[in-house]
Image (tube, grey):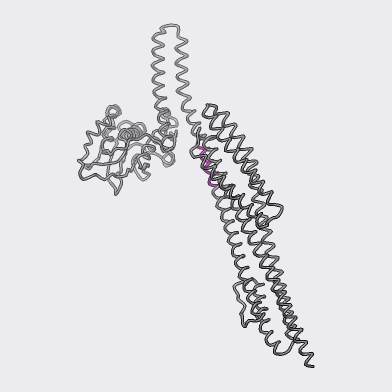
C-alpha cells in the first residue's frame, strides 16, 4: 500500500514535471515566435513608412517641377540637387532595411526581390532627375515647347508609370507583410491559450488523483493559473497571476505574466502603428486634396487672366492695324494722312503701354516682387500732389474737393509716387463714375497703430454685387455695361489694391457708407523719432511731382 502511494506520488510529480516542461517549451516557443514577429512587424512597418515618405517626397518634388517648368515659368524655384539627395537618402534607408531583413533571416526568398525593386526604383528616379536637368538645358537653349513636351512625356512614363508602380507594389507588399505578421501573432496567441488551458486541466486531474497534501498544494496553483489564462484569453492582459512559493507553479505563473506583458506590449505597438498609419494616410489624403484644389484654382485664374489680357489687347492692336491700313490706302494728301495715322498709333501705343504696365504691376505684387521705394514719408504729401495733378479735371467737371488731413505728420514707410498713383486712381474713379459736380472728400486720421485714409463721394454709389468684385482684374461692373466707360480696362481698383498691399496696408469699400461711395485704406504707422524734425508735406509733395 505505501509503495503504491509513493508510486502514485512519483507518477503525479513526474506528470506534473512533464506538464511544466511542456509549458516551458511552449512558452519559449511562443516567446521566440513573438520576438520573430515583432522584428518582422517592425521592419515591415519601417520599410512601409520609408516607401510612404518616398512617395510623398517624390510627388512633392515633381509636382513643383511640373508647376515651375510646365505651368508657370522657365526655371526651378528650388534646389533640384537637394531634392534628389533627400530622395536618394530615403531609397538608401529602404535598401538598408532590406539588408537587415536578410541578415536576421526574415522573409526568405523575398528580400532579393525587394532589394532589386529598390535598385530599379533608384535608377528610375535618377533618370527622372536627369530628364529634369535635360529639360532645363533645353529651356536655356530657347527650345521651350520641345523641353516641356519632353518633360511631360518623361514624367508620365517614369514618374506616373514606373516609379508610382514600384512604390504602390512595395506599399502593398509591406501591408501584406504586416497583415501576415498580425495573423501569425493571433495564431500563436490561440495556440498558447489552448496549450495553457490543456495544461491547467491536466494539472487539475493529476492533483485530484494524487495525495491530499499534494492535491491541496496543486489546487491553489492551478486555480491561479486557470483564472489567469481565462483573463488573458478574454483580453485582460493587465491581470497578473499571483506568484507564491518557489516551485514549478510559481515559475509557470511568472512565465504567463511575462507572456501577457509581451502580448500587451505587442498589441499596444500594433495599435499605435495602425493608428499612426491611418493618421498619416488621412493627412496625406487631405494634403493631396488641398493641393489639387489649389492647382485647379490657379489653373482657372491663369486661364481667365490670359483670356482677359487677350480680350483687352485685341482692341488697341486692331486699331493700330486699322490706322496703318487706312494710311497705306490713302491716295491723296499722303503726308497728312501718314502724320495723322502715326499720331493715333502713338496715342494707342501709349494706352497699350499703360495697360501692360498695369498688368505687370499687378503680376509683380502677386509674385511679391513689386519695385517699391522704402522711405519714411508723410502720407499727406501724395494726397496733396494727386489733388494738384487733377486740379484742371476738377474744374472741367465742376467737382468739389475737400481734404481733412490734420496737422500731425502721417508718417508711413513706402513709395511716394506709388501712393500718389493710388490716390489718383481713387479720385479719378470718383469723378468718372459720378455725375458732373460731384463732391469728393479726402480724410486722414490715426486709429491706434494705423493711418486711415478715406476717399468719399456723394455720387450714385456702388451696389453690393459690384462692391464684392470691385478689386478683381478687368471687372467693370453692371453700371458701366452700357455706357461709354467700357473703355475703362477694369484695372484701377486692382492696381490700388496691389499698391496698398505692397505697403503692408489694407483697402476696402465701406458697405455701410450712405449717400455715395467710400473707399478706405489703412497703413501701418511709423513712429516719429524724437531727434528728427517734423515732416514738411510741401517738400515731399515736390518730390512726388
Q: Nearer the viewer, residue 502 or 185?
A: 185
Quadrant the N terminus occupies: bottom right
Number of labelled discs? 0
Q: Left or right: 186 with respect to 62? A: right
Q: Residue furthest top?
A: 332
On whether residue 453 falls in the magenta region, the answer is: no
Q: Position of residue 470 (x, y in %)?
A: 42, 38
Magenta segment: 288-301
**Which image quadrant: the C terminus?**
top left
Picture layout, residue 270 above or below residue 196? above
Q: Quadrant of residue 520?
A: top left
Residue 318: x and y in percent read 47, 21
Please state which of residues 57 and 352 is positioned toward the viewer in this rendering.
57
Residue 349 position, x and y percent, is 41, 21
Q: Position of residue 385 (x, y in %)?
A: 27, 32
**Quick check: is 292 in the magenta stretch?**
yes
Magenta highlight: main SS: helix
On screen, residue 235 above or below 307? below
* Residue projecting furthest to the bottom: 1
Q: Residue at x 41, y 7 (%)?
A: 333
Amino acid at each position: 500500500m505505501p509503495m503504491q502511494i509513493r508510486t502514485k506520488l512519483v507518477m503525479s510529480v513526474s506528470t506534473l514535471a512533464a506538464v511544466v516542461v511542456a509549458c516551458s517549451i511552449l512558452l519559449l516557443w511562443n516567446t521566440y515566435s513573438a520576438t520573430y514577429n515583432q522584428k518582422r512587424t517592425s521592419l515591415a512597418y519601417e520599410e512601409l513608412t520609408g516607401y510612404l515618405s518616398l512617395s510623398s517626397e517624390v510627388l512633392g518634388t515633381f509636382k513643383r517641377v511640373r508647376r515651375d517648368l510646365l505651368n508657370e515659368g522657365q526655371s526651378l524655384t528650388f534646389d533640384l540637387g537637394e531634392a534628389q539627395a533627400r530622395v536618394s537618402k530615403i531609397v538608401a534607408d529602404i535598401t538598408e532595411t532590406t539588408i537587415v531583413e536578410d541578415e536576421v533571416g526574415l522573409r526568405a526568398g523575398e528580400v532579393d526581390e525587394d532589394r532589386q525593386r529598390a535598385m530599379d526604383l533608384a535608377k528610375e528616379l535618377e533618370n527622372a532627375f536627369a530628364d529634369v536637368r535635360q529639360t532645363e538645358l533645353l529651356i536655356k537653349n530657347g527650345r521651350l515647347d520641345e523641353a516641356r513636351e519632353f518633360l511631360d512625356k518623361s514624367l508620365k512614363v517614369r514618374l506616373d508609370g514606373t516609379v508610382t508602380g514600384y512604390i504602390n507594389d512595395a506599399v502593398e507588399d509591406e501591408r501584406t507583410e504586416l497583415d501576415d505578421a498580425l495573423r501569425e501573432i493571433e495564431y500563436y496567441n490561440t495556440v498558447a491559450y489552448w496549450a495553457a488551458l490543456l495544461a491547467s486541466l491536466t494539472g487539475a486531474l493529476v492533483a485530484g488523483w494524487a495525495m491530499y497534501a499534494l492535491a491541496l498544494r496543486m489546487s491553489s496553483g492551478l486555480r491561479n493559473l486557470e483564472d489567469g489564462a481565462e483573463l488573458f484569453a478574454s483580453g485582460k492582459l493587465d491581470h497578473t497571476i499571483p506568484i507564491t512559493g518557489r516551485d514549478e507553479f510559481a515559475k509557470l505563473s511568472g512565465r504567463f505574466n511575462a507572456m501577457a506583458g509581451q502580448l500587451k506590449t505587442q498589441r499596444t505597438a500594433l495599435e499605435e502603428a495602425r493608428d499612426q498609419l491611418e493618421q498619416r494616410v488621412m493627412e496625406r489624403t487631405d494634403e493631396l486634396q488641398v493641393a489639387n484644389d489649389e492647382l485647379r484654382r490657379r489653373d482657372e485664374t491663369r486661364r481667365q487672366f490670359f483670356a482677359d489680357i487677350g480680350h483687352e489687347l485685341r482692341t488697341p492692336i486692331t486699331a493700330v492695324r486699322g490706322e496703318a491700313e487706312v494710311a497705306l490706302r490713302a491716295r491723296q494728301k499722303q503726308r497728312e494722312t501718314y502724320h495723322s495715322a502715326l499720331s493715333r498709333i502713338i496715342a494707342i501705343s501709349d494706352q497699350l503701354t499703360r495697360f501692360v504696365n498695369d498688368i505687370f504691376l499687378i503680376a509683380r505684387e502677386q509674385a511679391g516682387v513689386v519695385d517699391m521705394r522704402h522711405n519714411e514719408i508723410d502720407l499727406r504729401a501724395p494726397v496733396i500732389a494727386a489733388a494738384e495733378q487733377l486740379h484742371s479735371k476738377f474744374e472741367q467737371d465742376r467737382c468739389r474737393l475737400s481734404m481733412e488731413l490734420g496737422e500731425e505728420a502721417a508718417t508711413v514707410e513706402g513709395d511716394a509716387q506709388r501712393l500718389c498713383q493710388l490716390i489718383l486712381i481713387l479720385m479719378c474713379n470718383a469723378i468718372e463714375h459720378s455725375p458732373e459736380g460731384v463732391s469728393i472728400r479726402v480724410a486722414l486720421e490715426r486709429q491706434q497703430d494705423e493711418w486711415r485714409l478715406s476717399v468719399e463721394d456723394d455720387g450714385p454709389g456702388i451696389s453690393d454685387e459690384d462692391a464684392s468684385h470691385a478689386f478683381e482684374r478687368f471687372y467693370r461692373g453692371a453700371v458701366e455695361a452700357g455706357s461709354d466707360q467700357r473703355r475703362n480696362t477694369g484695372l484701377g481698383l486692382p492696381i490700388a489694391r496691389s499698391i496698398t498691399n505692397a505697403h503692408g496696408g489694407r483697402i476696402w469699400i465701406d458697405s455701410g457708407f450712405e449717400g455715395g461711395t467710400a473707399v478706405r485704406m489703412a497703413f501701418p504707422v511709423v513712429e516719429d523719432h524724437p531727434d528728427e524734425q517734423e515732416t514738411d508735406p510741401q517738400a515731399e509733395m515736390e518730390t512726388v511731382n
